[in-house]
Amino acid sequence: MSTSKAQISLDTNRTIAPISPWLFGGFVEHMGRCVYEGIYDPKSPLADERGLRIDVLDALREQSYTVMRYPGGNFLSGYNWLDGVGPKEKRPRRRELAWQSIETNQFGTNEFMEFCRAIGVEPMLAVNMGTGTIQSAADLVEYCNAPTGTCWADLRAAHGHPDPYNVKIWCVGNEMDGPWQIGHLDMHEYGKKALEAAKMMKWQDPSIKTVLCGSSNNRMATYPEWDRVSLETCWEHVDYHSIHYYAGNHDGDTASYLAIARELEDYVDTMAATLRYVKAKRRSRHDVYLSWDEWQVWYKGDPLQGNWTEAPHLAEETYNLEDALVVAQWLNVFLRKSAVLKIGCVAQVVNIISWLQTKRDGLLKQTSFYPFKLASNHARGEALDVQVSAPVVETKKYGPVPVLDVAASYDLETGIGAVFIVNRSQTDAVVTELIWQAEVPHSVPQVYQLAGNDAKAANTWENPNLITAQPIEAPKLTDGKTTLQLPPLSYTVLTTQAHRGESRS
Ligand code: AHR
C-alpha cells in the first residue's frame, strides 16, 4: 500500500446552507418484502402487538430517520387508498399490477401512521396520479388532515382515529414520466393533472407542502424538459420537485463507480438551474426546492415480478464495501447541495433494495447501513464549504477526480461539528491534515471508520459484522490542526467540539 498526502480546510464562517433535517428520510413501498415481512409481520416472533417488527423498528431508530415516504413507488399508481383502511377482514385482496404480486391490504394508511409514530418520523404521503383522480387525492387529504364533521374525516374517526394526522408533505404521483408507470402521462398531461390535484389538495388543507414528480433519472429521453414543463405549469402550487436515481457498478469499473459523486452533483446542478429558470420565467417570488425521494444503489439484478404471490423476494440487493462508499458520497452530496436539496428518502428502508434484510427471526445490517447512520446522526446545523487539496485518481467515466470526497457540518448552537471523508482510492492511504481556520474546536470527541481491503466484501448472515463502522482512536488536536491516516476504500467521520454558543466573527 502506498501513501499520499492531502489537506482539508474548514471555516465555520464559510457555510453553504442550513442542513434540512428531512434529508435523512426513507421510503416504504408495497413492494416485495418491504411492508410485509419487513416492517409489518404479525406472525414473526419478533413482532409487537401491532404486528410491527421490533428489531426493524430498533434499527430504523438507530439510523435516526426523520421522514418516511409511502405507499409507493410504482405501486402507488394503481392503488386505491380506500382498500387499505377500515376493518382488516373486509379489505380486498388484489392483483397488484406494478410488481405482479398479491396485495392483501392488511397494512394501509392508519397502520403506516402508527409505524411513523413508533419511530418518530414525519409521514410523507403520496397520491395516485395514474389510475387515481384529483378527487381521490383531495379525499385522502381530508381523510388524513381534516377535523371530524365531514364525510372522509368522519370515516377516519370511525376507523378509530378521531384526531387529524396533519400530514405535512404530499407527493403528487410517482415517476409519471416513465412508460412503466401505471397510467403514465406525457409532461403536458401530467403538469395539468398535477396542478389541479395540488390545488384541490391545498384547498383541503392550505398548510400542506406538495412535491411534483420530476424526472425518474438523468437518462430519461424527456430529461430535463419534463422538469421544465411540469414546473412551469405547476410552479405556484408546488413546494418541492422530486428527483430519483439508482446507482450501480454496471461495467465492473470500480474507479468510476467510486467517483459517482461527480454525476450526482451534476444532476442536482441541472435541476437547480431548471428551478431558477422557471422561477425567473414565471416572475415568481415563490421557491421550489428539490426532494431526492428515491435514491439507492440498485443493479444486481434480483427479480422484479412477484408471480402473483404475497410478499415475494424482489430486489433484495447484497451491498458490499464499494456500495457503502457510494452511499457515503451520496450523503456528502446531500450536504454540499443543501442550499437546494431539502428532502431525501432512501429507497427503501428494509428488504427491497435495502441495507436491512429480515428473516423470520433475524435482521442483517449490510455495509451501507453504517454510512447512513453516521451521517444522519452527526450532520447538524449548517453545511460547510470545505476546501480540499488532494491528489487525483484517474477514472474512465469522469476523468481525474480528487481522491477524497469531503463534506462537513457545524452547529453553532452546540458547537459540535462533523467532517465526513471518503477515501476513494483502492490502493493508497491518504495522510490528511485537517485545518480549522475559524472557530477552532478544542477537542475531537469521536472518530468512526468503515474500511476494508476488498471492495467486494459484504456482510452475510454467517458473517454479519465483516464491514461495520468502528470507533477509532481520536487524533490529537493542536492549534486547530490534526492529522488522520485514511486507509484506502474507507469512510471516516470525525466529530469536533468547540465552545458552545461561540458567536461568529
Ligand atoms: O423503489 C423501487 C421503484 O423504483 C419504485 O417503485 C419506483 O418509483 C422506482 O422506479
Image: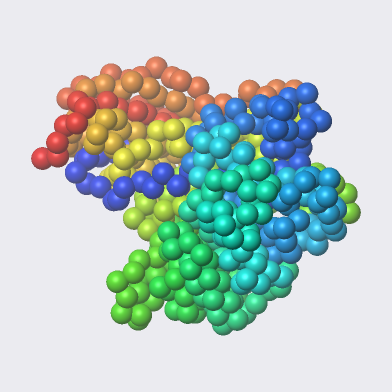
Q: Position of residue 198 (x, y in %)?
A: 51, 69
Indicate left or right for 24 with 420 as reference.
right
Q: Please report the residue visible at 48 percent of the width from the left and 53 percent of the height from the top.
A: 168
Indicate left or right for 25 with 409 as reference.
right
Can residue 61 be seen from the camera position used here? Answer: yes
Q: Position of residue 192 (x, y in %)?
A: 55, 80
Q: Front-most of 109 and 229?
A: 109
Of all residues, the one furthest to the left in this rendering is 505
Q: Please report the residue visible at 32 percent of the width from the left and 75 percent of the height from the top.
A: 284
Q: Position of residue 29 (x, y in %)?
A: 68, 50
Indicate left or right for 102 with 170 as reference.
right
Can residue 297 be seen from the camera position used here? Answer: no
Q: Please report the residue visible at 63 percent of the width from the left and 61 percent of the height from the top.
A: 151
Indicate left or right for 301 with 297 as reference.
right
Q: Please report the residue visible at 63 percent of the width from the left and 54 percent of the height from the top.
A: 154
Q: Position of residue 254 (x, y in %)?
A: 58, 46
| Image quadrant in which the C terminus is located | top left
